[in-house]
Amino acid sequence: GPTIVWFRDDLRLADNPALHAAVERGLPIVAVYVLDEDSPGVRPLGGASCWWLHGSLHALGESLKALGGSLLLRRGPAADVIGTLAASTGAGAVFWNRRYGAAERAVDTAIKAGLHADGVEARSFAGSLLFEPWTIRTGQGNPYSVFTPFWRACVAGPPPREPYPAPESIDDGSGTLPSDRLEDWGLLPTRPDWAAGLRAAWQPGEAFAAEALDTFLRESLARYADERDAPAQTATSRLSPRLRWGEVSPFQVWHATQRVLRGADAATASSAQRFLTELGWREFSYHVLFHAPELATENLKREFDRFPWPPLDDRVLEAWQQGRTGIPLVDAGMRELWQTGSMHNRVRMVTASFLTKNLLVDWRVGERWFWDTLVDADGASNPFGWQWVAGSGADAAPYFRVFNPELQAARFDPHGEYIREYVPEIGTAAYPAPLVDLGETRRAALAAYEYVKAAK
Ligand code: FAD
């Protein structure tokens, strides 16, 4: 019978190992995406993620059509949907690319067992990470808890495989099978339509992802090392939502960068290494998630469970969310996030530090806001980033490192271009006074941290 290709976080045709293997199998293909809001423990998508998913699924459907295929859309618990689809099509095999969160792995393992019991082949492939989490171990056989030796171990091994080409055509096995209409899934905001800024900033889809990678390598890679920390510069790749949704694979990014590296001048070469190291942080986040599935909900350093968080003040939280704290770099970042669904990495660190340390709000509260508002909201990188800033995470910044948003602005946005873009009323009476005193709140945070240290 036909091969079912179950698309998940891999919304692309090129370098899609599951799809590639399905085409090699030589039988008709049933491509399906399942909107799963029911499987236990699978975290519901945030609003900005839903917006991105809609656009990316639309693009994937069109690309499949252009090759003679189609994309079935189904809603429900993945186990039911895939089981029913396999039975009704008489499928001989179901292929997918792996996921790494505990709940997702549990779903996939159960489905695999169910299919095998019914005599259907079920195979998973490595499409989202350069290095599978169980392959990178310390000399003692443990997972790494520190980034630098982790990444050194990754790059010391065999290089990541070459990307697979996109199929030239697809033999569509979906016939008259019913499909949901994407429009009926309600992924786009309606009243109010808050997505105008997202539409202006982004175009989801594999073709735009390839273009973004290409443009970055041609125009920005050479200055990446020098300018990646400056939020007003366009020196970073902006590939994070593409990687999150799998519109581009890390294998494609890796090998495209290697091609530039060959014959590059010294400055470009060191920039390229720096860029690949950032991809390494993405890998590290996923490896940490794989080995510590509680990453999004629990302090990895358990002594932080004793942190004396004061009661949450909703007005303070809202001022942070809406970019009205009176601290210019924080407000610029939070407004960039709300308007565009993204925020520069340097400013993510500053806004997260301000929330957890100057406002003494539990990192999980900030993580949830980012989860809802980021187009790259990622089950590994987002909680990893928050725990890194909060000091409770793997290879985290030490707690006593409190980012000073004024010094950070002076250093990384010296001409105030970034701040003025998002906070045009800066310097006028319309701009609020600082919500808190940076020095006082910093001292209070360090005092609170003494409890944590004492608990160690
Ligand atoms: P580039 O500098 O061009 O880097 C290339 C790629 O490497 C990125 O696209 C991303 O996939 C990866 N990468 C870069 N830096 C990191 C990092 N520190 N950790 C993990 N991966 C990295 N990244 C997400 O993809 N999703 C998130 O939900 C997310 N939440 C974050 C929350 C906080 C509090 C912090 C401090 C960081 C978070 N990051 C997250 C990491 C980082 O900020 C973004 O990946 C980066 O800003 C994306 O911009 P870029 O694609 O231009 O990055």
Image (cartoon, rainbow, N blue to C red):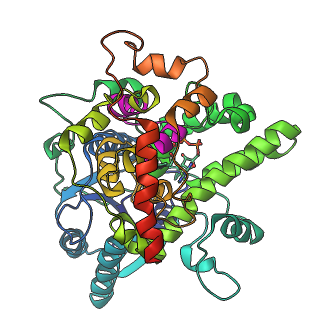
Point 29% across, 75% down: residue:
107
Q: Nearer the viewer, residue 3 or 275?
A: 275
Does the magenta-highlighted stretch encompass residue 229? Answer: no
Side of 261 where 401 appears, left or right: left
What is the x, y in percent for residue 317? Answer: 26, 41
Point 75% across, 33% down: residue:
222
What is the x, y in percent for residue 422? Answer: 41, 21
Does the magenta-highlighted stretch encompass residue 351? Answer: yes
Q: Nearer the viewer, residue 313 or 29?
A: 313
Height in image: 74 above or below 455?
above
Height in image: 343 above or below 332?
below
Q: Which residues are magenta?
A: 333-353
Is residue 419 visible in the rendered structure shown here? yes
Height in image: 85 above or below 137?
above
Side of 219 where 328 appears, left or right: left
What is the x, y in percent for residue 369? Answer: 29, 46
In which image quadrant can residue 270 be found?
top right
Q: Main secondary structure of the magenta part?
A: helix
Side of 174 where 293 appears, left or right: right
What is the x, y in percent for residue 408? Answer: 57, 34
Point 40% across, 50% down: residue:
444
In the rendered image, which quarter contains the N terminus? bottom left
